[in-house]
């Protein structure tokens, strides 16, 4: 994503009407490539101009303690802070585009509005889960990606024991080899449990509850 079309801008402005609390977008840039992201920084500034509740900060890898504080270990990365400075364990690795950009916008709305959209029963199951550090590997055009990914973001938002990071394999191709990605999205939980494909919230919760992974993993 290097620019926002007029049509997309109108839709984002409409979505931002439900914002209630401040959100700060932190952009962690890789060392030595600080000047490679001017177009994206302009797009971030454009996004923030759509609501007085939004602001952005950019920082360079390892120049501050923010990388460690927010557990950022791949660059570039985006972290969303609520008004209390809580990142809710949510991270976007790479410049979001396509479905990933849509989820990025929806996550901003969720954090600001405080509305996670989960039913009571689903939220209780999420809160009962043990610690889960999820990493979702995909490309922006995976069919059906948005709802699955957004459900994972919701889980991280409501539970302090769950984290959710999403990485664009086009920008991080080495992860496809490291995790033997054949089907997308591929989700890694706590660096051990691995499962591939699109699932409903109920199915995702069952996988995490029963620790059901891919046969080859």
Image (spheres, rainbow, N blue to C red):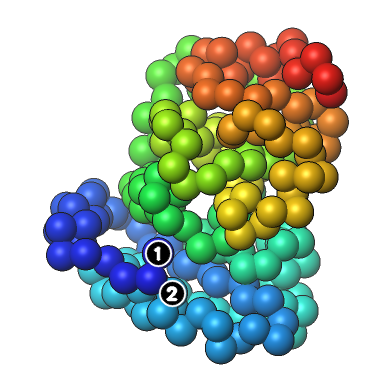
Report the side of 217 relative to 153 (left or right): right
* Residue 203 visible, this orientation: yes
How far across and how far down the image is residue 98, in percent? 39, 50
Q: Residue at x 36, y 38 (%)?
A: 115
How many numbered discs sit on the rendered protein? 2
Q: Nearer the viewer, residue 192 or 19?
A: 192
Q: Pick the quarter of the image with the C terminus.
A: top right
Note whether 70 is above or below 207 in the view shown: below
Query: Marks 2 and 1, how far apart in space?
Result: 7 Å
Above-or-below relation of 199 to 99: above
Identify the mark nearer the N-term, 2 or 1. Answer: 1
The label on residue 40 is: 2
- Any part of residue 132 in sight: no
Q: Is residue 51 above or below residue 109?
A: below
Residue drawn 65% across and 25% down? 196
| Image coordinates for residue 207, horizontal then vertical, percent | 67, 15
Left-right relation of 31 to 89: right
Return the x and y of residue 34 as percentages of the image width and height.
61, 86
Q: Quadrant of residue 74?
A: bottom right
Query: Label 1 near label 2: C-beta < 8 Å?
Result: yes
Secondary structure beneath label 1: loop
Q: Which residue is mark 1?
A: 1
Q: Residue at x 42, y 29 (%)?
A: 144
Q: Position of residue 28 (x, y in %)?
A: 62, 72
Residue 70 or residue 73, whichever sits in front: 73
Quadrant housing residue 125: top right
């Amino acid at each position: 994503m290097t620019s926002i079309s007029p049509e997309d801008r109108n839709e984002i402005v409409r979505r931002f009407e439900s914002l209630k609390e401040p959100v700060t977008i932190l952009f962690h840039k890789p060392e030595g490539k600080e000047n490679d992201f001017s177009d994206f920084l302009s797009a971030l500034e454009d996004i923030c101009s759509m609501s007085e509740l939004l602001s952005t900060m950019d920082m360079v890898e390892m120049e501050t303690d923010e990388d460690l504080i927010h557990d950022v270990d791949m660059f570039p990365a985006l972290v969303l802070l609520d008004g209390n400075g809580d990142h809710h364990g949510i991270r976007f690795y790479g410049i979001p585009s396509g479905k990933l950009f849509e989820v990025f916008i929806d996550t901003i709305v969720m954090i600001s509005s405080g509305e996670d959209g989960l039913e009571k029963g689903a939220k209780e199951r999420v809160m009962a889960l043990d610690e889960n550090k999820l990493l979702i590997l995909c490309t922006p055009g995976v069919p059906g990606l948005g709802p699955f990914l957004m459900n994972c973001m919701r889980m991280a938002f409501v539970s302090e024991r769950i984290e959710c990071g999403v990485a664009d394999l086009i920008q991080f191709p080495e992860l496809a080899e490291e995790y033997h990605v054949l089907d997308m999205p591929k989700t890694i939980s706590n660096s051990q449990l691995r499962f591939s494909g699109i699932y409903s919230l109920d199915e995702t919760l069952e996988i995490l509850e029963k620790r059901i992974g891919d046969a080859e993993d």
